[in-house]
Amino acid sequence: GAVVSQHPSWVICKSGTSVKIECRSLDFQATTMFWYRQFPKQSLMLMATSNEGSKATYEQGVEKDKFLINHASLTLSTLTVTSAHPEDSSFYICSRQSGNQETQYFGPGTRLLVL
Amino acid sequence: RKEVEQDPGPFNVPEGATVAFNCTYSNSASQSFFWYRQDCRKEPKLLMSVYSSGNEDGRFTAQLNRASQYISLLIRDSKLSDSATYLCVVNGYSSASKIIFGSGTRLSIRP
């Protein structure tokens, strides 16, 4: 069964609005979770590492003030896309590491379309 | 040069055929290697890990060549359900920030 869930699975919003995406680790208390973005026909790109109880670590080129990450509990991380614009339309996927930390379990993803 | 490179395809093969993909990586210090499968509009799912000794799981065989820095995936007796994008994933270090995804190889199996 699924080990990571995401909500919502898809969202359509107007330009300028903020969108919150939730990611839950269902079977494991995850101190660290990850947020990826995937544009059509491209590979997954890591946006940030979400750390429970502390600030997220952002990858180079990702605006931390635009993509707000909160990891308030060991099972929930949220990504808020603030003042979304059409270029933010993408497939956002969260993940947690496997027990041996070698690989990842992914959530089902959230498809965002900004009009 | 990309850190992980894959032939984007698409590979279009008949059902029952054998198909092979290669993936090259640039960081010789990379530690772990995986093949993931991603269906259209879905999240990636782990298909198999790749070891130097090679590993096989049913119709799927994965191999690693550290000297030439490539990994391969062989699918035998392909099924319609094998149609998907196959992602090569390389983990350089224990930190997830060093997990690098290839852009994927699209496979389409025709009846």
Image (cartoon, coloured by chain):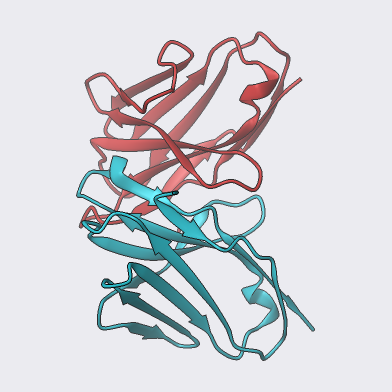
- The residue drawn where x is 39% and y is 52% is A105
Side (left or right) of B87 relative to B49: right
Q: Is residue B4 above or below residue B106?
A: above
Residue B10 in the image, given as x and y percentages of width and height: 69, 66
Side (left or right) of B101 relative to B67: right
- The residue drawn where x is 30% and y is 40% is B97
Residue B46 in the image, given as x and y percentages of width and height: 43, 63
Q: Is residue B69 above or below residue A103?
A: below
- The residue drawn where x is 48% and y is 13% is A66
Colour in which the image shows chain A:
red
Viewer-closest of B62 and B40: B62
Q: Is residue A27 above or below residue A112?
A: below
- What is the residue that sits farthest to the front in this orientation? B1
| Residue B66 image-quadrant placement | bottom left
Side (left or right) of A113 relative to A69: right
Can you say which quadrant of the picture contains the C terminus of chain B?
A: bottom right
Q: Is residue A99 above or below residue B98?
A: below
- The residue drawn where x is 66% and y is 89% is B17
- Residue A3 in sight here: no
Colour in which the image shows chain B:
cyan
Residue B37 in the image, given as x and y percentages of width and height: 52, 63
